[in-house]
Image (cartoon, grey):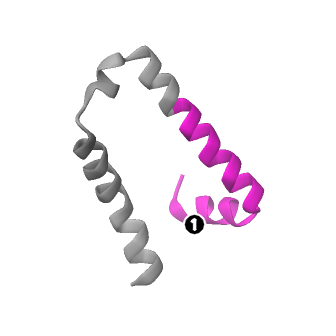
Amino acid sequence: MNCTLLDKKIKKMNWCDIQLIKLSVAGFILMLAKFWPGLLGLEWYWYGIIFVLAAIKPLIKTFG
């Protein structure tokens, strides 16, 4: 699939669809944490680093 096809499909979604996708991803992450206890054993700053690294590109696209 190329990006233009994905862009067209995403534009058909409304805010509720996007929020449901976010909720399903959060549920999947919690399931991974349940099956892999080592994931929750990281120090707090690792989660902060992951958050910042994952947020950089969307923030640049939004405000850049």
Is 26 located above or below residue 57 in the figure? Answer: above
Is 10 located above or below residue 45 in the figure? Answer: below
Q: For the stretch drawn in magenta, what is the main secondary structure?
A: helix
Q: Quadrant of residue 37?
A: top left
- Determine if the magenta segment contains residue 12: yes
Q: Position of residue 33 (x, y in %)?
A: 42, 24
In this view, which residue lies farthest toward the bottom? 64
Q: Residue at x 37, y 76 (%)?
A: 60
Kind of residue at badge 1: Thr
Q: Position of residue 57 (x, y in %)?
A: 36, 67
Asked whether 58 or 27 is in front, the reply is 27
Is 63 located above or below residue 50 in the figure? Answer: below
Q: In the image, 53: left or right of 4?
A: left
Q: Residue at x 38, y 61 (%)?
A: 55
Please report the bounds of the magenta region as a residue range.
1-28
Q: Residues within 10 Å of mark 1 (few under 14, many from 20)?
A: few
- Determine if the magenta segment contains residue 52: no
Q: Position of residue 7 (x, y in %)?
A: 61, 65
Is 51 located above or below residue 36 in the figure? Answer: below
| Quadrant containing the C terminus in the rendered view | bottom left
Helix, strand or loop for disc 1: helix
Q: Position of residue 21 (x, y in %)?
A: 64, 46
Asked whether 17 or 5 is in front, the reply is 17
Q: In the image, 21: left or right of 25?
A: right
In this view, which residue lies farthest toward the front? 44
Asked whether 23 or 4 is in front, the reply is 23
Q: In the image, 43: left or right of 58?
A: left
Q: Say if residue 13 shows up in the picture.
A: no
Q: Quadrant of residue 47?
A: top left
Q: Say if residue 6 shows up in the picture.
A: yes
Q: Which residue is mark 1?
A: 4
